[in-house]
Amino acid sequence: MDNKILRKLFLGFIHIHILYHADKEGIYGSWMLEELKEHGYDISAGTLYPMLHQMEKDGLLYKEEVKVEGHIRKYYGATDHGVEVMKEARAKAYELFKEIK
C-alpha cells in the first residue's frame, strides 16, 4: 500500500522533471528514462510513454519526429503553457519543501 501512495506522489515530481528538461532541450523517451533513473525514479517505458502522450494532449509538450540513424525518434519540448505550469509547480514545491524540511 505504501508503494502505491509513494508512486502517486512521485508521478507529480516526474511530471515536473519532464517539463524541466523538455524546456531546456528536446527530450526523447529512452533518454528520459535514464535521466529519471539517475534521480532514483524507477519507472518503465509503459508508464513514461503514456505520460508523455497525455502531457502532449494536455498542451504541456509538443512533439517533433526526427529521423535518427534510419529510425524515427520522437522529441518532446515544453510548450509555453508547459513552461508556465512548471514554474508554478516549482514555486509550490519550493514552498512545500521549505515547510517540511
Image (cartoon, rainbow, N blue to C red):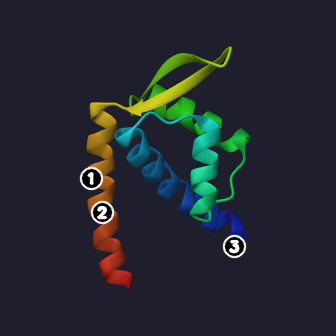
Q: Is mark 2 on a helix, strand or loop?
A: helix
Q: Tell me the amino acid under the disc marked 3.
A: Asp
Q: Measuring 34% from the left and 38% from the top, which residue is drawn there?
A: 82
Mark closest to the chain's N terminus, 3 or 1: 3
Judge depth for marks 3 and 1 and give the one in front. Answer: 1
Judge depth for marks 2 and 3 and give the one in front. Answer: 2
User: In the rendered image, which residue does mark 2 sit on?
Assistant: 92
- Classify 10 Å Cα crowding around label 2: few (below 14), some (14-19), many (20 and above): few
In the picture as drawn, the residue positioned furthest to the front comes out as: 69
Distance from disc 2 to disc 1, alpha carbons, whole Å, reads 6 Å
Q: Is mark 3 on a helix, strand or loop?
A: helix
Q: Tell me the amino acid under the disc marked 2.
A: Lys
Q: Tell me the amino acid under the disc marked 1.
A: Glu
Q: Give the left or right position of residue 73, taking residue 63 as reference.
A: right
Instruction: Give the image quarter of residue 92.
Output: bottom left
Q: Measuring 47% from the left and 30% from the top, which residue is drawn there?
A: 76
Q: Give the left or right position of residue 9, taking residue 77 as reference.
A: right
Q: What element carries label 1?
A: helix
Above or below for 46 versus 11: above
Q: Measuring 54% from the left and 17% from the top, which residue is drawn there?
A: 66
Q: Give the left or right position of residue 52, taking residue 99 as reference.
A: right
- Classify 10 Å Cα crowding around label 1: few (below 14), some (14-19), many (20 and above): few
Instruction: Provide residue 60's location: percent of width, then percent of height.
Output: 39, 34
User: In the rendered image, which residue does mark 3 sit on?
Assistant: 2
Mark closest to the chain's N terminus, 2 or 3: 3
Quadrant in the picture for the N terminus: bottom right
Instruction: Provide residue 12's location: percent of width, then percent of height.
Output: 49, 55
Q: Do the residues labelled 2 and 1 touch (CB within 8 Å)?
A: yes
Instruction: Give the image quarter of residue 19.
Output: top left
Viewer-proximal residue among 84 and 71 = 71
Instruction: Provide residue 15's location: percent of width, then percent of height.
Output: 48, 48
User: In the rendered image, which residue does mark 1 sit on?
Assistant: 88
